[in-house]
Image: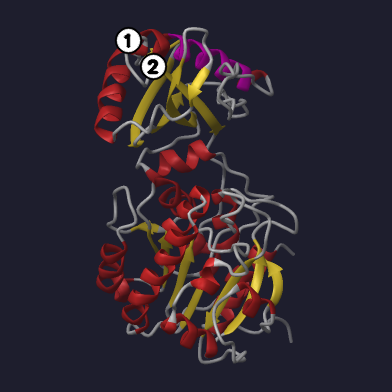
Amino acid sequence: MELFDLYRRISVKNDKKILLIVLDGIGDLPVNGVTPLEAARTPNLDKLASESTLGLHFPVGRGITPGSGPGHLSLFGYDPLKYEVGRGVLSALGLGMELTERDVAARGNFATIDSDGKVIDRRAGRIPTDLNRKLIEKLSKEIKEIDGVEVFLKTEAEHRFALVLRGEDLGGRVSDTDPQLTGKPPLEPVGEDEKSQRTAEVVKKFIEKAAKILADEHPANFLLLRGFDKLPPVPSFEEIFKLKAGAIASYPMYRGVAKLVGMEILGIDGEGELLKEKIELLKKKWNEYEFIFLHIKKTDSYGEDGNFDAKVHHIESFDEVLPEILALSPDVLAITGDHSTPVPLKNHSWHPVPVLIHSPYVRKDDAKRFTEKEALKGSLGMFRGTELMPQLMAHALKFKKFGA
């Protein structure tokens, strides 16, 4: 029996509410002997930890560094090895682009190339979002169709955008054109199969046309594409767990992964953390949903920047608003991350992620704080991220007994 078949069979509806807070990239490594969680002053989080059960999870598996998509799918209970989804699909969905079975989506960056055709800035100096919109409008006006394939473009923010190609016999297995390094020329898109090679040929022509249109622009005189994919068949979160679920996230990537599994996207739409706005929206929507996913981004951003002090400060900012969240009295509250983003590495990593579960039915660990070391001592132990969601369901009394 598949686990989802089991969950469908034993899930029951009741009036209990589950809140999942994802502090993106929260796990870390010590700098001068302490991690950001250890360095931060977090009296509210410390008190909550002392009344909760703690542990550590591997989003994909031991030694595997997850992207944000696999990390979040895992937290929602979906095995990311089974439900593999390209970044383009998640970005497009998060931007409100409706995808059909005829579509292939990709994530795009405006970039800067030199006279030799080598990439000198993969992000075009992080151009302003308003300039991005003007460039997308210009490209959209000039490139509407290629070889019978419709072309759709939409601004995300700064240098980022989404591309959707719509047509017959398109495949989604196309390699990235982003070399991920400066000083290198863009890569040629290559399809893994016949249909994907047709997509790759369309992509080549799109890039050629775009390059001519952008030739006189500076610094955004080129574009790079990655994360090609088609919309995969994914069972809905509500179907599996019988939960009406809402998602509060400001970045399209996280809105996209929530939308992929069928969560309703709630109200926040804009670049930046918007922490206060998210908390106000959480309060406003609290009574309408049985499950809410609340995403906090900057813990990851500051980890990638290698900015220890800023990551500490943002953890403290979250701690300050935690009493407002606790005042809603969620029946089950989980706080964790989708992956670790250690300051010393300035990137996602394979390190296990601390997790806290609070409910009336936990075995309290009497933890001193919510940190990596305290989580290591917690009674949840170490587990795969896909095992978090069934534990939240159980603590909310939303699973009936299996078997006689």
The image's colouring method is secondary structure
- Residue appearing at x 54%, y 82% in the figure: 369
Say if 355 sits above or below 238 in the image: below
- Residue appearing at x 56%, y 59% in the figure: 338
Q: Are marks 2 and 1 in contact (CB under 8 Å)?
A: yes
Q: Is residue 138 visible?
A: yes
Please state the horizontal and vertical placement of residue 52, each as a whole percent of the image: 55, 86
Q: Residues within 10 Å of mark 2 (few under 14, many from 20)?
A: many
Report the magenta stretch's main SS: helix
- Residue appearing at x 58%, y 81% in the figure: 394
Q: Which residues are magenta?
A: 196-208
**Is 287 displayed left or right of 90 in the figure?**
left
Say if 331 sits above or below 316 in the image: below
The type of residue carrying mark 1 is Asp
Please state the horizontal and vertical placement of residue 383, each as a whole percent of the image: 70, 70
Numbered label attached to residue 216: 1
Q: Quadrant of residue 264?
A: bottom left
Say if 229 sits above or below 392 in the image: above
State yes or no: residue 202 in magenta: yes
Q: Residues within 10 Å of mark 1 (few under 14, many from 20)?
A: few
Instruction: State the quadrant of the C terminus.
Output: bottom right
User: Outermost residue, front direction?
Assistant: 32
| Residue annotated with mark 2 | 221
**Is 195 displayed left or right of 258 in the figure?**
right
Please state the horizontal and vertical placement of residue 144, each as a whole percent of the image: 34, 16
Secondary structure beneath dot 1 equals: loop
State yes or no: residue 132 in magenta: no
The type of residue carrying mark 2 is Asn
